[in-house]
Image: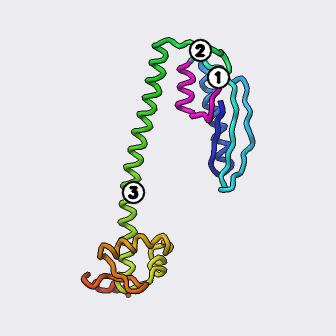
Amino acid sequence: MTFEVVGRPEKHVVDALAQYLENIRKEEARILIVEESIEDPVTHDDGMFSTFAEVEMLGKDLDTFTWLCLNFSPASIEILEPEQVEVNSQDMTNWLNDLLSKIHEIGSDYRNQKGAKEHLTVAMNALIQNAILLSVRNGEKKADAIGKDVGIVPDQLKPFLDSLVERGKMSLSGSTYGMPDSAAKVAPVKKKK
């Protein structure tokens, strides 16, 4: 099996691969590592690091290799011997059910993460729009000034500004943004003495 780890910093990549192999070694009743070769980390153009290990091992049975593949996600696997593997229907049934269980678990996790991401996106968009509106509530401003107020560069801010103008929440005059004429004027915030 080949195990690959990509990430940063370099120490994390090395430590993560070592931990993978250590966790496999703990399964000594089912798995025996015969030989392993660990490559030094390589730096990529994007600042990430990667390393991999090629591990030759003996496994007790098909269930062991299924468990190993589902829980450790090797980059690749090659069965060296036996050349012919005979699997009875019960073992194949168990193997397929293990595979299906993992697929369902991944699908459920994906749907949960997708829902959380969508919720966070909606909340973040609302926060950004509110920050923009607070920035211009006491006077008109250009995009770069609004960007400084809310901490977002003008290019990334533009879709929010366009949306607020399109929905009538803000006005645009030339390159200056402000509250729409129909909005009630908000009294300036009084500064404490």
Magenta stretch encompasses residue 82: no
- Of the residues under marks 1 and 3, which one precedes in the sequence? 1
For the point 56% across and 21% down, the residue is 64
Q: Which mark is residue 79?
A: 1
Q: Residues within 10 Å of mark 1 (few under 14, many from 20)?
A: few
| In this rendering, position of residue 117 left or right of residue 32 | left
183 up-or-down from 125: above or below: below
Secondary structure beneath dot 3 equals: helix
Magenta stretch encompasses residue 65: yes
Q: Quadrant of the N terminus?
A: top right
Marks 2 and 1 sit apart, C-alpha to C-alpha, by: 10 Å
Marks 2 and 3 sit apart, C-alpha to C-alpha, by: 49 Å
- Asked if disc 2 and disc 1 are in contact, CB closer than 8 Å, the reply is yes
Q: Amino acid at mark 2?
A: Val
For the point 49% across and 15% down, the residue is 91
Q: Which residue is mark 3?
A: 120
For the point 67% across and 17% down, the residue is 81
Q: Which residues are magenta?
A: 62-79
Q: Position of residue 128 (x, y in %)?
A: 40, 69
Name which quarter of the figure residue 62 lies in. Answer: top right
Q: Nearer the viewer, residue 22 or 115?
A: 115
Name which quarter of the figure residue 110 lies in. Answer: top left
- Of the residues under marks 2 and 3, which one precedes in the sequence? 2
Q: Which residue is mark 2?
A: 85
Q: Amino acid at mark 3?
A: Leu
Secondary structure beneath dot 1 equals: loop
Q: Position of residue 26 (x, y in %)?
A: 61, 26
